[in-house]
Amino acid sequence: MSILLKDVHKAFGSNRVLKGFSLEVQPGETLAIVGQSGTGKSVALKHVVGLLRPDSGEVWVDGKNVGDMDLEGLYEVRRNVGYVFQFAALFDSLTIGENVGLGLRRMPELTDEAISRRVRECLALVELEGYESRYPSQLSGGQKKRAGLARAIATRPEYLLYDEPTTGLDPVTTTVIDRLIIRTREELEVTSVVITHDMESAYRVADRVGMLHDGVIRFLGTPDEIQACPDPIVKGFIEGKPELLEGAG
Amino acid sequence: MRLNILLDPFRWLGRTAVDTAAQIGQWGGLGLQTLRGIQRVDIWGRLLLGQLAKIGVDSVPIALFIASFTGVVMALQASYTFTGAVPLYFVGTLVGKTMILELGPVLTGLALSGRVGANIAAELGTMRVTEQIDALETLAYDPVAYLVVPRVLAGLIMVPVVVILATAIGITAGWGTSLYLLDMSTPEFMKGLRLFFDDWDVKFAVIKSLSFGLTITSIGCFFGFTTRGGAEGVGLSTTRAVVVSSMVILVLDAFWAATLL
């Protein structure tokens, strides 16, 4: 079982963002969703964990329909899904250790010692050993993103959702984060969805790349396939040529 | 064109009425979620102590500062008004009665709506716009149980405590002023203080304080939770939280006076 969005429509007032968005993520794969800013990539991702509900259409995670689930059901699904936010969304008032351990506190089977051990393991995985007692304000942008990733993987989820994990980072830190995404998939065998508009990053981490345009998936294929795609909308975006996008209307 | 200009105030009035009604409905919805969240002691239990300190203990200095100067002014104004016409021991009556029934709860409530209400709205508003509340949800936390319940409970518990302390300090300041500036004796001040004292006055003050505690924290949480946009949205929510809770405190003050006295 995996993630399936079927004919999802979502509007905010008169602004129709998703207009029949459909996508299936295969178990164990990393799928990148690319597209211009404001096309609804993050909106689509938020549907997967029920942070947004579709106006119509279906959202399935692990064989369960998230779209019409009650809160208790959603909490069950969310325990199996890690979410890495665009700006990390670390809790300012908690230390990095407390941030990473917060999700673990919802697992009654874990003792305090087990939680501390798991927090240290996760921070080691993202190369932030010894940062447990620091606060988010004491970390750089790249370190915050890594701490956000550590928090997302702490509960050992089967699914990981990344919302623009490399936006605003320098090229070296971007590569570090990309390697972490690949390492996380290999070591934890998770199914991942990565939202990005950094094509180099998408080619590095993804098995398949989907391009979101005008509320629907315009193209879905491997990194090689998308680079060979003749569609001017796709080509214009991945090659950074606005004239192609404008020409295609 | 001219008709449009004439209709504009009515449109504005209509829109404001609809928006206000919608906000009251949303505030009620958050109230219901808060009641449901109270059952999740496992989430808010360990957070309550911190909020009791933040909302209650940290508010004591400002509340006592306001109350002590109010007590001094009350005593001086009472003696100025009574001179020659009313026995001076009535200064004790006026200071005690006014501090317990009105100034202790209302001035503390208004001060806390600025200190506590603004703090809550700004903190939760920032958490909203930086996706920290979404992050809580993805970690399988009920954000209302985690953020709203401990703050509202702390407000309900600590605002009456702060009001009682402030009232006591206000009366003590009035007594000190009577002794050192008005040439009254302690027995005189106490005679006036006891003259019309009724146990019900204290209960009335506590009931008012409970309602103020609920108002300040729930309105702060509501505007924080519903913040949209960035820094400007946080600023707007903070201002609204202070203005609306101050207005509701004054309306409640009149309501309790009309119904309980």
Image (tube, coloured by chain):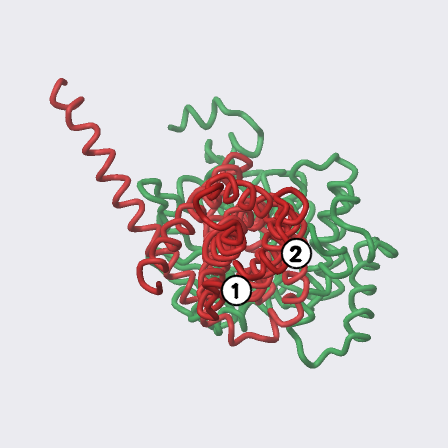
Chain colours: A green, B red
Q: Residue furthest left?
A: B3
- Whether callout 1 and callout 2 share a subunit is answered yes
Q: Is residue B86 visible?
A: yes
Crowd rating for badge 1 (residues with CA inside 10 Å; few <14, some 14–19, many 20+):
some
Give me the residue at 57% from left, 34% from top.
Answer: A238
Q: Is residue A60 above or below residue B125?
A: below
Q: Quadrant of residue A119?
A: bottom right
Is tag 1's residue or tag 2's residue first in the polypeptide sequence? 2
Crowd rating for badge 2 (residues with CA inside 10 Å; few <14, some 14–19, many 20+):
some
Disc 1 to disc 2, C-alpha distance: 35 Å
Q: Which mark is residue B54?
A: 2
Viewer-closest of A126 and A35: A126
Left or right: where A127 falls relative to B220: right
Q: Is residue B129 visible?
A: no
Give me the residue at 62% from left, 52% from top.
Answer: B175
Give me the residue at 58% from left, 30% from top.
Answer: A239
Q: Position of residue A6 (x, y in %)?
A: 40, 59
Q: Quadrant of residue B17?
A: top left
Left or right: where B136 falls relative to A60: right
Q: Residue furthest bottom?
A: A109
Chain on which label 2 sits: B
Q: Which residue is mark 1?
A: B194
Residue at disc 1, secondary structure: helix
Q: Is residue B166 above or below residue A167?
A: below
Residue at disc 2, secondary structure: helix
Q: Position of residue A134 (x, y in %)?
A: 81, 52
